[in-house]
Amino acid sequence: MTNYRVPFVDVPTHFGRLRDQIMNVIEETLRQGNVVMRGELREFERNFAVYMGKQYAIGVGSGTDALHLALRAAGIGEGDEVVTVSHTCISTVSAIVHAGAVPILVDVCNDFNIDVDKVEEVLGPRTKAILPVHLNGRASAMARIMAMAQRWNLIVIEDAAQALGARYDGRLVGSFGAAGVFSLYPFKMLGAFGEAGIVVTDDPEIAQKVSILRDYGQDRDTGEILYFGFNSKLDNIQAAILNVKLQYLPQWIERRRTIAQLYNAGLSGIPQLRLPPCGCDAYFDVFLNYCVMTAQRDALVAHLRGRGVEPLLPISFAKPLHKHAALGLTHFQLPVTERIAGEFLYLPTNPELSDEQVEYAIECMQDFYTRREGGYGN
C-alpha cells in the first residue's frame, strides 16, 4: 500500500481523532451484550431521522440494500420501469433489477446528475418511478423532478448515497421523495467502520415494510412471516459508532466545502481543467468528491500519484454501466455519460486534510499543466 502525502481517505487519522469516544461506545455496547437490533441501533435511527427531518429512519446492511428494500417497499416490482442514470455505481441499477423492475437509463448534465429534459422523453405506460442519483455531494434538480413525478404520477426514490447534508432550495436531499437512501460505507459523508446503509421516509407503510424485509420478512410483534425477506440489519456496534460520528457531520461538511474553495481558488486559472459547477442559491454542495474533468486525465492521474497525491478514478464510473455487455444495457445511447467517463477524476477532499496538503495537491496540478503545456494558456 502506497503512503500518500495527500491520501484520498485517511482512516488512521480519522479514527485517531475519535478514538476514545469510539472505543468507549464499543466497550459499553459489548458489555451490555447489545450486538443485534438493540438500543444503539434504535437511538441512531431516531437521531438520523431528526437530522433529516423525517418521521422514520431504518438502518440496513448497506447502501445497496437500502436502495433495493426501499424500491420493494414502495411497490416497485416485476415489469415496472424505473428511470435512472448510467453514471452511477452499479448498486443503483442492481437494486432496480433485484426488485424485479427494468432500468431505463438517461443521460446526465454537466453537473453529473440526471438530465431532467431527457427523463420525459423515456416516460411511458410502464414507468413507475424515477431514481435520481445525487452525485459527488450535489443535489439533482429536485424541483423539476418532483413536478414531473406529480404530472406523471410517479414514485421518487432518491439515491443520496454520496450527498448526505447536501441541499436543494434549502431542503436536504433524501427528503423530497417517497424515500431517501443513504450509504454509510466508511468513505461516505458519514461512514461506519464497515458496511451500512439507511432509508428515510415519512410513509409509515414504507418504513414498516423496509423494517420487516431487512429481518427475514418477519413481523417480530406478531411472529408472522409476511414476505420472503432478507438478512440486512445494520450492525448494532456500527450504529453505536455512527451515533458518535453523526454529531461531527456538520463540521466535516464545512471542512469539505473549505477544501473545495481552496481547489477553486488554486485551479480556476487552468483552462484545460473543468471544475465542479459553481454553487448558486438553489444548491448547497457538500463535496464528497471534488470532481474535475480534463482531456489529459490518465497522464494527470499518473503525475499526481508519482508526486504523492492520491486521486480516485472509481472502476464502476470509468466505464459506463451501459457499456458492460453482460448487463444487457448496451442499447442505451448516452453521449454525455460516455464523454465524462473518459475525462473525470476525483481529488482528495477528506476532512482530515490540512490546508498545506490541499495546497500541495494544487501545486502538483499546476506543475503538470505548466510542464506539459508550456503554460496554462496553450
Image (tube, rainbow, N blue to C red):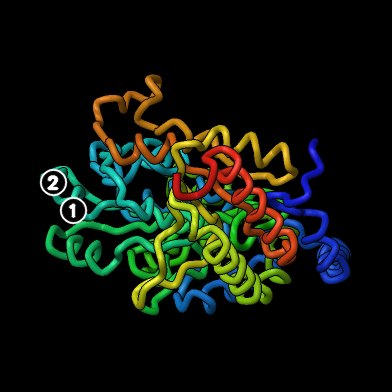
Q: Which residue is mark 2?
A: 121
Judging from the image, what secondary structure is the residue with disc 2 in? Answer: helix
Measured as percent of width and height from the top left, residue 329 is found at: 31, 28
Circle number at residue 257: none
Circle number at residue 117: 1
**Residue drawn at point x = 76 percent, y = 57 percent:** 35
Q: Nearer the viewer, mark 2 or mark 1?
A: 1
Kindly identify the amino acid type of the residue bearing the numbered disc 1.
Asp
Measured as percent of width and height from the top left, residue 238 is found at: 71, 58
| 131 relative to 212 in the view: left or right | left
Q: Is residue 212 visible?
A: no
Foreground pick, 330 / 1: 1
Q: Is residue 207 above or below residue 251?
A: above
Asked where in the image residue 189 lies, by quadrant, the reply is bottom right
Foreground pick, 326 / 102: 326
Q: Circles 2 and 1: CB distance less than 8 Å? A: yes
Neighbor class of circle 1 (other Cα within 10 Å; few <14, some 14-19, many 20+) is some
What is the quadrant of the C terminus in the image?
top left
